[in-house]
Image (spheres, rainbow, N blue to C red):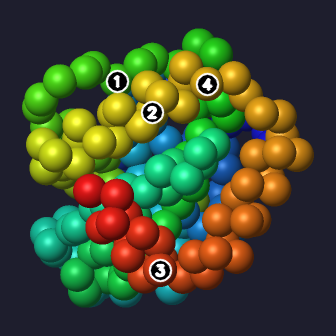
Amino acid sequence: MNKRKRNVHAYIVGQLYHPGRTRWPEAAQYDYRSGQHELVMFWSGISPGDIQAVKRGTCEFEMVELPPVIFLLYRINGACDWSDQPYSWHLLAEDERMLPPPGPGRALMQVRLVACETGILRAQRLISLKPRLTQRLHAAIRRQAAAPWPGDEAYDNALSAAYRQYPTAEALLACAKSQR
């Protein structure tokens, strides 16, 4: 797995998500790095309804821990059904690794929607996660950070095994609910 390097950049709707990059593969990416949660969805054919849903629609989040992988599950009413993104602390560049705080509180999640075809940031929104989810997610990230990196191949194998056992986001959601 390649480590992802965070871009220090002002994110402004209507401008490039990443300076100089105008194409992205259709995908999504969740990260907790430099003390911030971020979900970026790179979509093609973004509609005005998608933009409004990301800006104002009901967003739901859940998480499931299947070591060495953490999955963020999300649904945005009017834009996307339940989807999932794997996460590993160990895939971050070392200078971006920051442990989340323990204890109660609400984390903030930056949600961004980027057009694959142009690289333009089409919508963004800051969402407050529920306290219980915040505690569970932060505890899982701290446990993952404390565990040794199993290596790229072992991580990839664990990720593949998780998707074989839970082939859909809905199956991962059922697993997440059983972990609460």
Q: Amino acid at mark 2?
A: Ile
Q: Is residue 116 left or right of residue 128?
A: right
Helix or strand or loop: what does disc 3 sit on? helix
Q: Earlier in the sequence, mark 2 or mark 3?
A: 2
Structural distance between the alpha carbons of marks 4 and 2? 10 Å
Q: Which mark identifies residue 2?
A: none
Residue at 30% across / 67% down in the picture?
Answer: 177
Proximity of marks 3 and 4: CB atoms separated by less than 8 Å: no
> Sequence order check: which comes first, mark 1 or mark 4?
1
For this view, does 122 lie left or right of residue 49? right
For the residues carrying marks 4 and 2, which lies nearer the camera in this image? 4
Q: Is residue 46 visible?
A: no
Residue 80: image quadrant is bottom left
Task: Say few, some or many: other residues with alpha carbon within 10 Å of mark 3 (under 14 / 14 to 19 / 20 or more).
Answer: few
Dividing the image into 4 quarters, which one contains the N terminus? top right
Quarter of the figure with the C terminus: bottom left
**Badge 3 or badge 4: first in the primary sequence:** 4
Q: Position of residue 77 (x, y in %)?
A: 23, 81
As helix, strand or loop, the secondary structure at mark 4 comes to: loop
Q: Dot 3 corresponds to which residue?
A: 171
Q: Which mark is residue 141?
A: 2
Give the distance between the C-alpha atoms of the residues marked 2 and 1, in whole angstroms. 7 Å
Residue highlighted by disc 4: 147
Depth check, mark 1 against mark 4: the one in front is 4
Q: Which residue is mark 1?
A: 100
Of the pair 58 and 116, the residue shown nearer to us: 58
Please tell me how crowded label 4 is: few (under 14), some (14-19), or many (20+) other residues with Cα within 10 Å: few
